[in-house]
Amino acid sequence: MAPADSPPEPWPAQWLRGVLDLAVLAVIAQGQTYGYRIGNDLRDLGLGTVKGGTLYPLLARLEETGAVATTWREGKSGPGRKWYEITLTGRDRLLQEGARWRTFARLTSDLTDGPDTGTTSAAPAPASTRTLDAGAQ
């Protein structure tokens, strides 16, 4: 639970886990950047605070899979920084997963925008049209 003087995180952690890789790729796609700035950009975009213990392993995974390339730059007045740049593989992933995410978000919105099932008198849809398969691709 967050202390009383700090604002609550805007989104449940399980929602962020599902989209954080994609959000980080989208931020990096805007131009070369470094970890601390990525975290700030995500916060400024309204996704809340992403802790370093979550962000840096995610960045390492993106690098390992070839979605981002890194370079080390010496700092002018402080320590050096690892800079991240999206690769063609990363752009392809962002396009493909972004499209899938938008479809998923639309489906979820449509589902949750429906009538309150506790007060509706309409008959439920036939089982063949109500199936949700989390493993479907």
Image (cartoon, grey):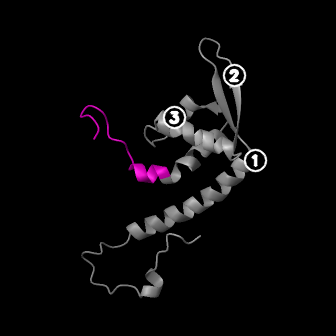
Dot 1 falls on a residue whose secondary structure is helix
Q: Disc 2 designates what residue?
A: 73
User: Magenta span: helix, strand or loop, mainly?
Assistant: loop
Q: Which residues are magenta?
A: 1-17
Residue 47 x %, y %? 46, 43
Task: Tell me the quarter of the image containing the C terminus.
Answer: bottom right
Task: Give the side of residue 119 with respect to residue 131, left or right.
Answer: left
In this orientation, which residue lies closer to the viewer: 48 or 53? 53
C-beta proximity under 8 Å, tags 1 and 2: no
| Residue of label 1 | 88
CA–CA distance between discs 1 and 2?
Answer: 22 Å
Q: Is residue 45 above or below residue 117?
A: above
Name the kind of residue labelled 3 in the image: Gly
Residue 70 is left or right of residue 137, and the answer is right
Q: Nearer the viewer, mark 2 or mark 3?
A: 2
Label whose residue precedes the other's in the sequence (1 or 2) = 2
Against 116, is 98 above or below? above
| Residue furthest top in the image | 77
Q: Which mark is residue 39?
A: 3
Q: Position of residue 106 (x, y in %)?
A: 50, 65
Mark 3 → mark 1, Cα distance in angstroms: 23 Å
Q: Residues within 10 Å of mark 2 (few under 14, many from 20)?
A: few
- Secondary structure under badge 3? helix
Q: Residue at x 43, y 40 (%)?
A: 48
Q: Which mark is residue 137?
A: none
